[in-house]
Image (tube, helix red, strand yellow):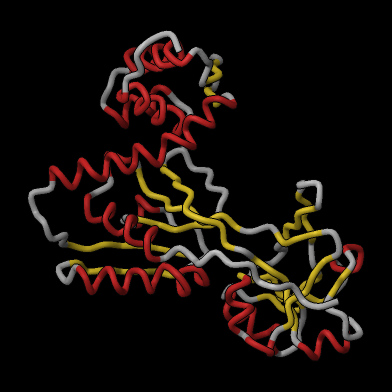
Amino acid sequence: MSGMISLEDVRLFAAVAHHLSFVEAARRTGVPTSTVSRRVAALEEALGVRLLQRTSRRVGLTGEGARLLERAGPLLDELGSVLDRAADREEEPAGRLRVTAPVMTGAQRIAPALFAFAARHPRLSVELTLTNAVVPLIEEGVDLAFRAGPVHDAELVARRLWSVPYALAASPRFVRQALKGRARIDRGSLGALPAVLSQPGGAWRLRRRDGSVEEVRPRAQFCVNDPRVAIAAAVEGLGVVCAPAEVIAQQGEALVRLAVAGRTVEPRELFAVYPSRRLLSARVRLALDWVIQHGRPPVRAAPAGRS
């Protein structure tokens, strides 16, 4: 490194990296565009690496820039949270808190955490909407959203929280009749099996042993936009379902977990999504910190079906 590193320079770099725009970062931070550009250049010089690729049309992250954002982003969020609490004269958060989350993860993880959060802060009014649709946060007045990744929206900050393990499963009757009693499937026959989907044309993402990921377009036997109903349809024997491994395990003997030869089901990344840091209130930060601490699923490996 060739010089002192400024925390403010890191913050400005993160703003540019989030929005992939110096102009937008300047607007969000209230710092002139020329200053933002100069301070990011100073950070690059201090680190001795190039963080951003600049052309006349676009700004992109280099590999070093992506790694810095991944490591520094959560630390900047935490620092902002600490400073907000220090500056917040009202100890008890109050007002309305509007949150959206996916149906399944929302019911399993987000909602129970928010129950405890609301009980702890009775002056708050919490509104939780469970939907798999992408809700426009600013237009709908939503403070905080939880979404499955990837998240592509330059207007929002996306903070990765944790991975949700997924698995394939089917009813015992389906396994007996369609799979001849075997819970292990070869990749070639998977796409031809009847499936229960949560959206038309949905794909299952499978990871090979070499780390590469492929998509399988299953044959939809039944499609419903509520994953809880999709699991119920699978329990009734209508086909193979792809769902959170934790939820499949909760079905007990009503579902058999399936294994695909040479593949594992790709987990889904859960993100906290919110407008830029300047718009994030102390009560939203408190809620996010609480969900991160109390909503995270336990780390355990679920067993695959026997072959």
Q: Is residue 104 left or right of residue 111?
A: right
**Can residue 226 be seen at all in this image of the molecule?**
yes
Nearer to the camera, 117 or 48: 48
Is 231 located above or below residue 259 in the figure? below
**x, y (%) of residue 159?**
44, 47
* Residue sitting at x 91%, y 85%: 180
* Residue sitting at x 79%, y 67%: 218
Q: Quadrant of the N terminus?
A: top left
Q: Is residue 39 left or right of residue 179?
A: left
- Quadrant hosting residue 24: top left
- Quadrant hosting residue 262: bottom right
* Residue sitting at x 57%, y 75%: 226
**x, y (%) of residue 296?**
45, 63
Is 180 located above or below residue 135 in the figure? below
Q: Residue furthest left?
A: 89
Q: How many marks?
A: 0
**Can residue 203 be seen at all in this image of the molecule?**
no
- Quadrant hosting residue 144: bottom left
Q: Quadrant of the C terminus?
A: bottom right
**x, y (%) of residue 145?**
41, 57
Q: Is residue 230 left or right of residue 96?
A: right
Is 182 located above or below residue 186 in the figure? below
Is 247 located above or below residue 32 in the figure? below
Nearer to the camera, 56 or 86: 86
**x, y (%) of residue 142?**
33, 57
* Residue sitting at x 80%, y 59%: 263
